[in-house]
Structures are given as C-alpha cells and as structure tokens.
Image (cartoon, coloured by chain):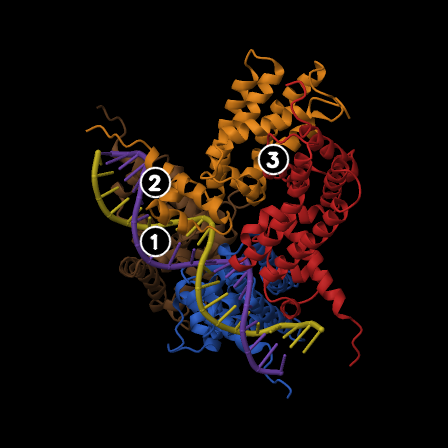
Chain colours: A orange, B red, C brown, D blue, E yellow, F purple
Amino acid sequence: MMTMTRDEPVRQRLLSEATRLFAERGFESTSVQEIVSAAGVTKGAMYHYFDSKDDLLHEIYGRVLRMQMERLTHFADSDASVSERLHAAATDVVATSVANLDDTKIFFRSMHQLAPDTQKIVRAERRRYHERFRDLVAEGQRDGVFTADIPAEMVTDFFFGSVHHLGTWYHPDGPLSGKEVGGHFADLLLRSLRGKVGD
Amino acid sequence: MMTMTRDEPVRQRLLSEATRLFAERGFESTSVQEIVSAAGVTKGAMYHYFDSKDDLLHEIYGRVLRMQMERLTHFADSDASVSERLHAAATDVVATSVANLDDTKIFFRSMHQLAPDTQKIVRAERRRYHERFRDLVAEGQRDGVFTADIPAEMVTDFFFGSVHHLGTWYHPDGPLSGKEVGGHFADLLLRSLRGKVGD
Amino acid sequence: MMTMTRDEPVRQRLLSEATRLFAERGFESTSVQEIVSAAGVTKGAMYHYFDSKDDLLHEIYGRVLRMQMERLTHFADSDASVSERLHAAATDVVATSVANLDDTKIFFRSMHQLAPDTQKIVRAERRRYHERFRDLVAEGQRDGVFTADIPAEMVTDFFFGSVHHLGTWYHPDGPLSGKEVGGHFADLLLRSLRGKVGD
Amino acid sequence: MMTMTRDEPVRQRLLSEATRLFAERGFESTSVQEIVSAAGVTKGAMYHYFDSKDDLLHEIYGRVLRMQMERLTHFADSDASVSERLHAAATDVVATSVANLDDTKIFFRSMHQLAPDTQKIVRAERRRYHERFRDLVAEGQRDGVFTADIPAEMVTDFFFGSVHHLGTWYHPDGPLSGKEVGGHFADLLLRSLRGKVGD
DNA sequence: AATGAATGAGGCTTCATTCAT
DNA sequence: AATGAATGAAGCCTCATTCAT
C-alpha cells in the first residue's frame, strides 16, 4: 500500500557505479552506457535523475566535499590543543580518503573534465575546505606552536598533495590500514611544523 | 623540390602543442585535429612521426622521465651528506616540475589513459625513479640521520604527492619562484625526517 | 477528495500552449515536456486528454478548419452579389488568419508532420474548404462578372498562398490591422478577376 | 595522373539527396543517416564537407537565393517597360520555383529550423531579394503605371505568398507547365495593379 | 614528407510513450 | 484526473585512424 522504495535505489546505484567506473578508467573513458549497464537500468533512467554525465560527476564531488567539510569542522572545532586538532584532522582526512579511495582517485584527476560552470562551483567549495584547514595551521603559527617560516597556505597544499596522491599508491589489502597511514602522515606534517630545532 | 624543413621542427612542434593542450584540457578531451591544427600541419604529418595519439603521450612521458631521472641521479650521486643530497634533489624536482608545469599537470592526470602496454612501460620507468629517491631516504634512515619510524617508501609517496600536486595550485606569476617553493618543500621534508625530538 | 479543476481548463491550456509553441519553434522541435510544463501539468495529464502528440496537432487543425469553414459558409451564403460575397469572404479569412496568427503559422508548416492517416483526414477537410471558395470564383466566372481566362482553381490557390504566407510577415503591432490587410488582399483579388480591360 | 574528380561528386550528391528528402518529409524528420545512405556515403563523409545538418540546409538556401537573385536582377534590369519587366520577373520566379519544386517546398517550411545565426543570414539575403522585387512594383507606382493604393511592400508579400505556396499544390505531371502557371500568376499580379478602373 | 577524403565505431542526449499507482 | 519513474529507439555529432596520392 505504502511504497517503501525511496528515491534512493536507482539513483544511489547509478552514483555508486559511476564512482567505481570513473575511478577505474577515468571520466572520459567511461561511457554512460557502461554506467547504466552496471547499474542495471537504461539510459533514460539516468537522465531522469541526472541532467547529464557532467551532473553525475558533480554529484560525486558534492558528496565528497560535504562529507570532508563536515568531518574537518568536527575535528577543527574540538576543545583540544591546536597540535592535537591538526593531528586529528590530518589523520582523519587520510583515513577517510582511503576509505573512499575511488572518490580520491577521481577528485583531482577529473576536475578539469567538469563543464566550466560546474567546475567553478566545485572549486569554490573545495577552496572553503582548504581554507578551513589552512586556518588551523595559521592558528598554530600565530600561537608560536608551529614554525612560521613557511606560509600556512603552502603547508596546506603540501599536505593535501600527499593526501590526493593516496589514490595512486594505496592498496586496501596492503599492510597498513587507513588509520595507520593517517597517523604517519599526520606525524610527518606535525614534525615538519616544529621548526628549526637543530637546523 | 627543395625541402627546407628538417625533421625536427614539425615533430617538436607537435610534441609542444600536444603537451600544452593535454595540460589545458586533458588527453581525452583533446582531439588529434586540435593538435595538428595548433602545430600548423595536417593529420598525415602527425601519423608520419607518431604511431598514434597514445604514442604522442608516451613520448611526453618518456621525455619527462628521462630528464627527471637524469637530474635525480646527478644530485643523488654527489659527494655531499645524505641530508644535503636529499635536500638538493627535493628542491630540484620541485623547481623542474614548476618549470615544466604542463608536464606535471599531465603526469598523473593522464597516466590511466595510456594503452595498457604503454602504461606498463611508463609505470616501470617511473618506479625506478621513485626507488632511487626512496633509497636516498632509506640511506639516511640506515645511517641514523633520519628517523626510521616511518617507512622510506611512504615518505617518498608523501613527498611526491606534494610534487605532483604543484600543477593544481602553482602559478608562474605568483610571488614565489620554483626554486623558492622547492626550498620550502625540501625543508618540510627534511624536518619531518628529523624524528621525535620533543614529541 | 474534492476536485475543483473542471475538465476544460487543463485541456484548453494544453491546446493553447501547444499552439503557441508549435508556432514558435515548430512541431518537431517542441517536446511534449515543454508543452506540459508550459501548461503547468505533467505528461500523464496530457496523455489523459490526448492520444498522442499527433492528436494534439490534429485538434489544432480541426479547430481552425471548423472555424474557417463556418465563417466562409456564412459569407458565401449571404444575399449579396457574388463580387460582394467573395470580397467579404476574402477579407474575413485574412482578418481571421491574422487574429489567429499562430494557427496560420502552423498550418502549412506542420501539415506534413501529421501521421499519414491524420493527414488524410485534415487534407480532405481542407479540400472542402478550398472548394467552397473556388466555387464562389467559378460562380462569378460563369455569370460573366469575373474573367474566366484563368482557372478558378488556380485563382484560389493563388489567393490562399497569400493568406498562408501572412504568418511569415504580418506583425500585430505593425501599422495595419488584420481587417485592413484583408481589405487590400480582397481588392487585389477582385481586381485581378476583372479581366482584360485595357490589356 | 591528374585527378579529374573535382570536389563535386560527393558534396553534390549529398546536397541533392538532402534537398529531395527535406522536401519529402521535412528537415526535422529527415535523419542524417537517411541522407548519407541515399548519397551512398557514410556520416563521416558528410561531416567532412558540412559542419552540421544545419549547415547542409544553409547551403540549400544559399544556392536557391543566389539563383533567384541572379535571375531577378537579369529581368529587372532589362530595357523593357516596368510592366514588362515585372511580368517577366514574376513569370520567371514561378517557372523557376516549379522547376525546383523541392527547394520551394523547403523554403518557408524549414526556415525556422535553422539555427538562430544561420537564420539571420538567410533572412537578410532573402530580404534583399524581396526588396528588389518590391522596388519594381514601387517604380511602376511612382510612374503612374500601377495603382498606388496598396503598398508595394504588401503587394510583394501577396505575390510571393502565392509563389511559395506552389509547392503545396503544383504537380509536374499536371496539365500546366511552370511557364504557363507563371504567365497566369503574372497576369493576376499585373491586373491587380491596374487600379480602380470600374470599381 | 605530407595531404585530405573517407570510414566506422561509438559517444551523449532527447524524446514520445507506457505503466503502476 | 493525474503523477513520475522508466523504457527503448533514434538522433546528431566526434574522432582516431587509414589510404591513395
């Protein structure tokens, strides 16, 4: 009587399969036909839920960005010291990137394939995320906890380069968990901010 | 009757324009027609010098890898201390990546677009480069100069992630030269290897 | 539970919007989605009132033909002289075509888009209308009021070509009203039927 | 040794078949596939010679307009009286329209299917043609040869409506040749311009 | 060394229509 | 009376590559 199928199933399946395929072979090399076949529906169904192939990619970006921003805010706004907050946030973004490795692979590889307008929207959202992280570094620098001899902006780019690169080398069945890699990455970051001890 | 154009010019121009276009809009989104138009020749000319579009990309990878390997070897094999050698090598790869920003943009973005066989060749070459750099880190760790609590392999991936990410944010007309960014990056790397001083 | 919308409004709105859109961009270039969106309903509603997109167009033709036939009959059956009757009928069809310019634009432009069977029906109806007008011309020729050196059939096609062409050049906000244009057209027609006065 | 095949064959065949098909079933209802199949080539060949389906239609319009303008100029610039020149031009445009009935069918039926920019170009060209004809009428009115009680502009629209309508009713295998119909049409036009003799 | 016509496969998208509700 | 998800066919166009010259 009352339908239980929410609007989720088909739409969700399309997003999942698209994510998997885009990560596997790239946005441009994945055909809409492959996506809908994998999701078990027809093209018409896809165009019922999404405006275009571009829109599908846009949704993937949106999902990732919303999640990462939410998590970053959570860690950045805690009561711990700035070192602890930055360490926690850094560990988490690595763990999350590893847990959603397909998203990570797609992120920087496919950004330039988005339509110009869509790209602008995504870049702006991404910029906000970047700035929230950078502010954490800057806060530590202002407080004298971190060395200030390298611009917070560059430190952030330095670190996120490493994060985005995870998709290139990390394998889920390798020896280290995402959390462990995250810990190492956070250590590397924090140490590099300790300044010119013996230099 | 009289041919003035030597073999080089056309081939070179094709490679240059292809590099520029692949960086600007991606490999898959650049048509052979666009490349030859930009180079001022016709398709026939391109297929005279290159086997395929894939081959063109392969050449770009080859050129980059040959150059980077040569430079890395130069710095890694010098007589300086391992710290100095790693610092110099790190600075140089950043400066070189920035000087050839289009190559940097292409590198990780388009690797998966190469034909499987070509890809295998490029990955192997890239692996050798990675290992040479990693060996430098491992050498410092063995010698006790660098902390060994994080695998040299991971440190290398950590650092090269930052390097490859340069294409995403560096602008030639920004405030910092490639050498300066290289210096900062090398500092961050070296410091993060100094180990658990006060942690 | 309580439905306020009567059958008419939605059906009428669909016909109006379809007419407007078909005139504006053509039958084939107008999608069912555009029609129902413009009418503020969904596709299901349209398929409730009409069998198909073709049926919608058919209804438009039917409406126009019924109206024009009715008006022509009115003028053609009056008591006036054949010249007066033809002049009045000619004036009126122009004025009416101008008053319903969208219908006029659609008429000959989209006839061939109708399904074969529907087309046959429309053409037959149109033929009856044409014949009624032609008979008026023929009557005048038989009575010696009009010159008979040009077949009534051709005179009719000559005149209706001009009428159907109105959609191409007439603008409601121009200097002349539909009635005025009708008067001029009727004059041109009647004069051309006066025969070889000084020729 | 020396190739004789001019760029004509394939391109010409494509234009011919497209003209035939557009006239037969309309621009929108004719697929590119149907055109190239009819011409015995593949789609790629068509897109080698034409930018788009729209461009193909544009070429058809161009060809017709160039021809008609040339012929009109020829008749309008002769040494005969204005009546004779107008009669000759009117007769000729009808004969030519009948000789190229497919072009005539396409002309007003498909104009609105052209891309906005293409449409603007075609309309401007068409406008020039229209004005040349109208000037002939105006000249006669100025000279007192034709009655001036109806604007030359409207007389021109009146007449060309009839001409464009030819595609709807004329059949090459009917009793009258194009020249004969042209003569009748020209008579109707000229007579309607003789003014209020006995009215 | 280089051209340019031509292929054939495949890509994204649109759309009229149906159907369960 | 009306919704909206889904289909399936078709449409326009792009493109890497080949080949005769």
Q: Mark 3 and mark 1, same subunit?
A: no
Chain letter of mark 3 equals A
Residue C58's place in the image compared with B51, above or below, is: above
**Which residue is disc 3 drawn over?**
A162
Is C80 on the left-hand or right-hand side of A182? left
Q: Find numbered disc 2 in the image and state the secondary structure of the residue it sits on.
A: helix
The amino acid at mark 2 is Leu
Q: Which mark is residue C14?
A: 2
- Image coordinates of residue D81 in percent, x first then y, are 64, 72
Query: What separation in Å lies between label 3 and label 1 (alpha carbons)?
Result: 95 Å
User: Furthest-top residue in view?
Assistant: A79
User: Furthest-front residue in view?
Assistant: B143
Q: Which mark is residue C80?
A: 1
Is D148 on the left-hand or right-hand side of C111? right
N-terminal of the two: label 2 or label 1? 2
User: Furthest-bottom residue in view?
Assistant: D1
Question: Of tags 2 and 3, which is closer to the observer?
Answer: 3
Q: Find numbered disc 3 in the image and state the secondary structure of the residue it sits on.
A: helix
The amino acid at mark 3 is Ser
Residue C43's place in the image compared with C91, above or below, is: above
Q: How many residues crowd mark 2 within 10 Å: few (<14), some (14–19), many (20+)?
A: many
The amino acid at mark 1 is Ala
Q: Quadrant of residue D127?
A: bottom right
